């Protein structure tokens, strides 16, 4: 019997990434759980391989893949979930804030994907799923740096789908709307309810609903889907 595919999920210590890791573990994949600071939650998935790295650092990404190659040889499926969010008026965004959000959300996705794709290219197969945001499609007041990074992920997805497609590597993007994770913790109960009221389905998404889509895009059922950005937002945005 063939070995199960190996999937690397970044930002799997919490939120959408953690939900994705659980789905893939439960589905029998060999799962590499990446985390940066959320070690305790990452370790709640004992069936997975755990690896720590700051993805905003090219050197740490490079070291992470050296470790991955030593452990499993390479990655068959990549789910890029790692990201940070912060709110600030556009004219108040500092150089440090801009670089922190872009380095983690966009540059980190770029470096991880570049490293993972080399093994996929050598075996002429692979799946890459990038987690963007509905804000990458619509923009977002007071989150221009976050929206810019997430829009960049969509552009990266479309470009790589064209470039890697001849090597049988599918690249797709998920653009979640409002998801019930700690990214919304800065909202007051009143603001959170106002957000929910603005969503046509009148609720937040559960992280597992995003994970279900990532699992589908990684499966043979999605074998002819590439270059797509799928909004899963309850009709919001």
Image (spheres, rainbow, N blue to C red):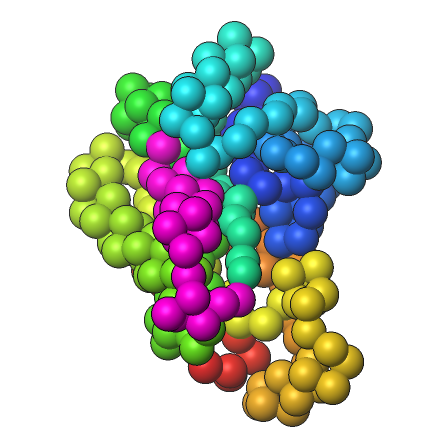
184 left or right of 167 in image: right
Count of marks overlaid on the render: 0
- Residues 166 and 229: in front is 229
The image quarter containing residue 114 is: top left
Q: Position of residue 109 (x, y in %)?
A: 40, 41
Q: Position of residue 165 (x, y in %)?
A: 23, 42
- Residues 195 and 204: in front is 195
Q: Position of residue 3 (x, y in %)?
A: 57, 21
For the N terminus, give its image quadrant: top right
Examine the rendered structure and indicate whether residue 51 appears above or below residue 71. Answer: below
- The prevailing secondary structure element of the residues shown in magenta is helix
The residue shown at (48%, 34%) is 55
The residue shown at (58%, 90%) is 198
Q: Position of residue 218 (x, y in %)?
A: 48, 45
Task: Specify whether residue 175 is in view.
Answer: no
Is 105 colored magenta in this rendering? yes
The residue shown at (56%, 38%) is 9
Task: Specify whether residue 86 is in view.
Answer: yes
1 left or right of 204 in image: left
Q: What span is colored magenta in the figure?
A: 87-111
Examine the rendered structure and indicate whether residue 206 appears above or below residue 21. Answer: below
């Amino acid at each position: 019997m063939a070995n199960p595919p190996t999937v690397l999920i970044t930002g799997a210590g919490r939120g959408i990434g953690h939900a994705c890791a659980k789905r893939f573990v439960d589905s029998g994949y060999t799962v590499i759980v990446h985390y940066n600071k959320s070690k305790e939650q990452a370790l709640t998935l004992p069936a997975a391989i755990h690896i720590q790295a700051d993805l905003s650092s090219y050197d740490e990404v490079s070291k992470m893949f050296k470790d991955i190659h030593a452990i499993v040889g390479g990655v068959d499926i990549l789910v890029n979930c790692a990201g940070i969010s912060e709110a600030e008026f556009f004219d108040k965004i500092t150089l440090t804030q801009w670089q922190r959000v872009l380095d983690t959300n966009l540059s980190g996705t770029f470096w991880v994907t570049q490293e993972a794709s080399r093994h996929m290219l050598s075996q002429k197969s692979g799946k890459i799923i990038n987690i963007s945001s509905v804000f990458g499609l619509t923009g977002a007041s007071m989150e221009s740096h976050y929206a810019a990074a997430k829009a960049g992920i969509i552009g990266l997805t479309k470009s790589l789908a064209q470039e890697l497609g001849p090597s049988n590597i599918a690249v797709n993007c998920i653009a979640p709307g409002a998801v019930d994770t700690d990214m919304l913790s800065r909202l007051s109960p009143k603001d959170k309810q106002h957000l929910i009221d603005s969503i046509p389905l009148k609720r937040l998404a559960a992280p597992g609903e995003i994970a279900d889509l990532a699992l589908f895009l990684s499966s043979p059922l999605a074998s002819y889907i590439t270059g797509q950005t799928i909004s899963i937002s309850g009709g919001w945005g």
